[in-house]
Image: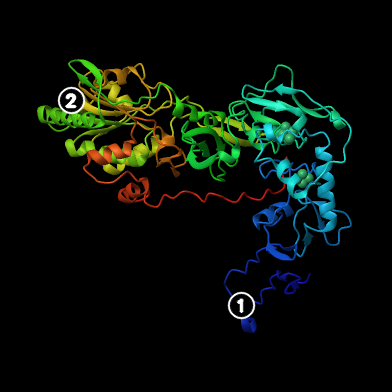
């Protein structure tokens, strides 16, 4: 098409620049002609696309459904399932929408009789050997095969022979393979090659004997393995942890952030009636894309740990006794106040856990500084393995995913809050070393845990062994046993807040379930101690904290997936 002319769907190609009038020589930079973005017509609707985008991605961006099994925007394109075939005017045969790039002026039909006939044939073929066990299949309710069978399939099967039966296989610590449900889309195989780079899964056999398998003695146990369950469009790969526990349509999804490291993976906590049943990845192009680590996937278990602390306790005549929240908070305030009146300013500390939300750290710091304006704000232990785990595409060597070495989610956020408040501060190593005079003077403090497993290190600050200790935690520990006042806290999934990840990205998370009976959210406790009315609302505290917290918002729930461009293998 000549420049300046219009494509059938409107003017697309910019005209040549004409330059300044009168032919006067100009010293300005020449015009830059940007490549026009393709515009295509799908089922009579004109849509703008990204350059080199596949038809399927352009349609999905525009909200036009094109069925697909083997296509996934995070994996290479194989175009093997053929359910996505569409009709393109001027092309004699149907083309795979997942493998055909858009071109300006292209006219696509996704609902023509040729396309619908193909969808029916593909569905009939896939269902030839597929068992009709939806009532007992964990995938029911979120199964592509079930959905497409309803939308695009035949009402009745014409197949009268016996179905091919294939055995179930244990393919990993957390994964079961129901081979007779598999439609050989190879998403799982491509994931282990292209993302985890571990290549445990492969396709064995040919034709109707084809099946997914692992190599002898090499189970699919890599640290990203659970993603193959999310990727499987049918109920072939299942998570043993979730198996037969809930029907998926009963689950509610709450956006959250991974608590296991400083990566800040975006997740959904899926729960029903106060119980979390599973963790799923939440797409974020800048953080974790489509994937999460298995540590993140199973992190919810700490929330339902039977050992969770549930009753406030206080020291009486040298022994801890159960008490009420009113008594516990009254005693905590009295003890801390007494320390300051006896030892003077600078005798209190607050140990802010890197598991706390930034808002909670802010409120606790305000409280401790109302009792002792010179109180030291210290960061709790920050466990670090020393090396990030980098996953690479086994074919290209390109990095695909990183599990961060720092095994807490919010060390950066806590440091930021402490920096905003100013005054005396310390890190955990300084508290242990006790080389600063101001730290030697500390005689009482508020210690927050909230770690998902045992956290009290071998080397602890001397203040943890004596003086006044108000401990707020979710799990028992030697420190909890020795506390003057012990307050059962809420786990991250039970409260709102925000964490800052290693990139400096401050990300909010929401409460999915209520705190276990007897525990209270830290935010509510601090508001009460500060004498403020009402319940804790993370967003209000963020407004009070000012920037950068005031403008932190939850990302859009349904972030559009980026279109997959050509796979560079
Ligand atoms: S197990 Fe699932 S993801 Fe893997 S090839 Fe079969 S259907 Fe696809
Ligand atoms: S999604 Fe296009 S061929 Fe499978």
Q: What colour scheme does the image use? A: rainbow
Give percent across and percent down for residue 110.
Answer: 77, 57
Task: Name the residue located 18 percent from the left edge and 29 percent from the top edge.
Answer: 336
Give the mark toward the camera: 1 or 2. Answer: 2
Q: Quadrant of the C terminus?
A: top right
Front-most of residues 493 and 22: 493
Q: Is residue 92 above or below residue 439?
A: below
Residue 424 drawn at (x, y percent): 23, 35
Q: Dividing the picture into quarters, in which one does residue 484 lie?
A: top left
On screen, residue 314 versus residue 358, left or right, reads left
Left or right: 524 as drawn, with respect to 290: left
For the point 69% across and 49% down, which residue is it?
Answer: 565
Residue beneath the point at 56% across and 31% down = 293
Give the camera-side residue of 233 and 31: 233
Disc 1, SS:
loop
Residue 568 appears in view: no
**Ligand 1 placement by image quarter:** top right
Front-lying residue, 147 or 429 = 147
Rendered image quadrant of residue 172: top right
Q: Which percent across, then down, holds residue 547?
A: 35, 51
Callout 2 environment at 10 Å: few (<14), some (14 to 19), or many (20+)?
A: some
- Give the residue at the far left of this rendering: 342
Seen from the viewer's position, the closer of residues 230 and 353 is 230
Judged from the image, the secondary structure of the residue bearing numbered disc 2 is loop
x and y percent of residue 228 in the render?
66, 33
Find residue 25 and name its label. Answer: 1
Q: Say which residue label 2 marks.
A: 441
The Cα atoms of the two marked residues, 1 and 2, are separated by: 77 Å
How crowded pointer 1 is (Cα within 10 Å; few <14, some 14-19, many 20+) is rated as few
């Amino acid at each position: 098409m000549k420049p300046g002319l219009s494509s059938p769907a409107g003017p697309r190609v910019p005209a040549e620049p004409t330059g300044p009038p009168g032919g006067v020589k100009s010293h300005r930079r020449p015009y830059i002609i940007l490549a026009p973005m393709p515009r295509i017509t799908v089922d009579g609707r004109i849509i703008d696309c990204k350059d080199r985008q596949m038809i399927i991605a352009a349609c999905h961006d525009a909200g036009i459904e094109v069925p697909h099994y083997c296509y996934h925007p995070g994996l290479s394109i194989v175009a093997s399932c053929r359910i996505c075939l569409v009709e393109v005017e001027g092309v004699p045969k149907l083309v795979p929408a997942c493998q055909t790039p858009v071109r300006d002026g292209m006219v696509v039909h996704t609902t023509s009789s040729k396309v619908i006939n193909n969808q029916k044939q593909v569905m009939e073929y896939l269902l030839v050997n597929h068992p009709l066990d939806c009532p007992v299949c964990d995938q029911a309710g979120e199964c592509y095969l079930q959905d497409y069978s309803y939308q695009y399939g035949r009402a009745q099967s014409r197949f009268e022979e016996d179905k091919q039966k294939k055995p179930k296989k244990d393919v990993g610590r957390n994964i079961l393979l129901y081979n007779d449900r598999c439609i050989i889309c190879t998403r799982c195989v491509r994931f282990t090659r292209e993302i985890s780079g571990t290549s445990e899964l492969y396709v064995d056999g040919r034709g109707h004997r084809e099946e997914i398998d692992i190599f002898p003695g090499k189970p699919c146990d890599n640290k990203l393995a659970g993603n193959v369950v999310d990727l499987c469009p049918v109920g072939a790969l299942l998570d043993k942890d979730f198996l037969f526990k809930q029907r998926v349509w009963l689950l509610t999804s709450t956006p959250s952030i991974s608590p296991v490291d400083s990566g800040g993976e975006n997740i959904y906590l899926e729960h029903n009636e106060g119980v979390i049943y599973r963790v799923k990845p939440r797409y974020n192009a800048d953080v974790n894309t489509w994937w999460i680590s298995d540590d993140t996937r199973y992190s919810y278990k700490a929330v339902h740990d039977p050992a969770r602390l549930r009753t406030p306790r206080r020291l009486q005549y040298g022994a801890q006794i159960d008490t009420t929240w009113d008594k516990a908070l009254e005693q905590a305030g009295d003890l801390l106040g007494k320390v300051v009146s006896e030892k003077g300013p600078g005798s209190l500390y607050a140990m802010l856990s890197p598991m706390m939300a930034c808002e909670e750290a802010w409120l606790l710091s305000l409280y401790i500084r109302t009792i002792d304006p010179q109180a030291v704000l210290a960061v709790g232990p920050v466990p670090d393995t020393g090396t990030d785990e980098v996953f690479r595409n086994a074919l290209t060597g390109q990095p695909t995913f990183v599990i961060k070495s720092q095994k807490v989610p919010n060390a950066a956020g806590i440091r930021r809050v402490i920096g905003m408040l100013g005054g005396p501060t310390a890190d955990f190593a300084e508290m242990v070393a006790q080389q600063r005079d101001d730290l030697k003077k500390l005689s009482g403090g508020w210690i927050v845990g909230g770690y998902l497993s045992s956290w009290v290190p071998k080397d602890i600050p001397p203040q943890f062994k004596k003086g006044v200790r108000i401990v707020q935690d979710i799990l028992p520990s030697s420190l909890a046993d020795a506390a003057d006042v012990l307050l059962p806290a809420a786990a991250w999934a039970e409260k709102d807040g925000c964490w800052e990840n290693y990139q400096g990205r401050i990300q909010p998370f929401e409460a999915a379930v209520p705190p276990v009976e007897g525990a209270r959210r830290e935010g509510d406790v601090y508001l009460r101690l500060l004498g403020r009315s009402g319940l804790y609302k993370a967003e209000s505290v963020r407004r009070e904290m000012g920037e950068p917290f005031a403008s932190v918002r939850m990302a859009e729930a349904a972030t559009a997936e980026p279109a997959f461009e050509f796979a560079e293998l």
